[in-house]
Amino acid sequence: MSASTAGPAAIDLVCAFAVTRTPPDPAGLAAASGHEEGGPLRVLRAGGLCLVVQDVPAALFDESALAERLNRPADLERCARAHHRGVEAAAGRGPVVPLPMATLYRGDLTAARAVTARQPVLDTLLDRLRDRTEWAVKVHAAEAAPEASGAPATATDSDSGSGSGSGSGSGGRAYLSRVSARRREQRGAHGKALAEAEAVDAALRRHAVAATRHRPQSERLTGRRAPQLLNAAYLVADARRAEFTAALARFTAGGAYPAVRVDASGPWIPYSFARWDEDPRADPDQEVPS
């Protein structure tokens, strides 16, 4: 997330959403909306590129005001949705490079200069993203069935309270043995789930142009008791979409890898592969070998 600090006399800032080569359809752009506090979306020319922007009030979008708003979950969600609407509006006629949420400039000239300075990288990204979309895949360990409560005590357990030293010792050893066995079973199940998550990733990479992994989400965010083992994104060529989705369907349907559960969504604008602040040629490990 980036924001330029506005001066005290600033009335409006320019919020930038995405870069494209072909300007979006004027009617579609007019029908789209960005931040509800700002003006209409418009196209700003920057060399041979087009930047979809919106004028927004500095009182709500300068550095201090924005930091305060984005610390409130409801406002953060509204800003994220508005940003996505702006990116979608830019993507009507060709590939786009989405900019980080809340990319703000003091005026059109500053915004155009920023894009022009990065034009070689942006051209490379636009070429790379043409006719390609992103698919998100999350793999969780399969949730184990809850253990039965109130299981009957074994004979050894019953004897442990008889006051016999040997009975108490054998009961304690039996309990520790069961705990140890349960831990070994849990470690084995987790190891199997990790191996299956890696197998899902390897299979999907064979049908993708590139892949990248994000940090697994916590149980608080996922709402699941089972841990998230893989949080990946795949850049898929339109020409290979059918084979990618066919491979994906085998995993999301379940059965192929019983130790995990696979969830997927897409196609999306390729946010994960459009970092305009990095040279896309500088990350060869992200590319999937052909």
Image (spheres, rainbow, N blue to C red):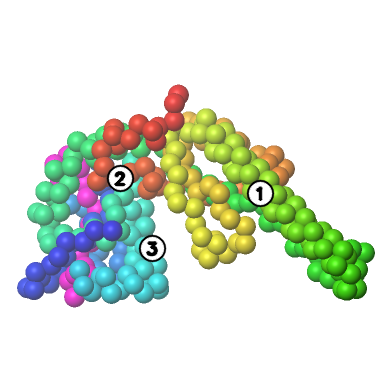
Residue 4 lies in quadrant: bottom left
Foreground: disc 1 or disc 3: 1
State the residue at coordinates (21%, 72%). Answer: 64
- Pick whichever, 179 or 255, lies toward us: 179
The residue identified by callout 1 is 187
Q: Which secondary structure dominates the residues rendered in magenta?
A: strand
Residue 78 at least partly seen:
no
User: Looking at the image, is mark 2 or mark 3 earlier in the sequence?
Assistant: 3
Image point 34% across, 66% down: which residue? 79
Q: Amino acid at mark 1?
A: Arg
Helix, strand or loop status at disc 3: helix
Q: Amino acid at mark 2?
A: Arg
Instruction: Return the residue nearer the eye: 176 or 110.
Output: 176
Where in the figure is residue 175, as x and y percent of width and height? 79, 61
| Residue 191 visible here | yes
Spatial CA span between label 2 and label 3: 19 Å
CA–CA distance in space, label 1 to label 2: 37 Å
Q: Are marks 1 and 2 in contact (CB under 8 Å)?
A: no
**Residue 119 disc label:** none
Q: Which residue is mark 3?
A: 81
- 157, above or below 132, in the image: below
Q: Tag 2 or tag 1, which sits nearer the N-term?
A: 1
Label 3 crowd bin: few (<14), some (14–19), many (20+), radius 10 Å: some
- Residue 26 rendering spot, x and y as whole percentages: 27, 53
Residue at the (20%, 68%) spot, across then down: 63
Range of residues picked out in magenta: 45-62
Packing grade of label 2 (10 A; few <14, some 14-19, many >=20) is: some
Question: Which element carries disc 1, helix, strand or loop?
Answer: helix
Dot 2 corresponds to which residue?
A: 275
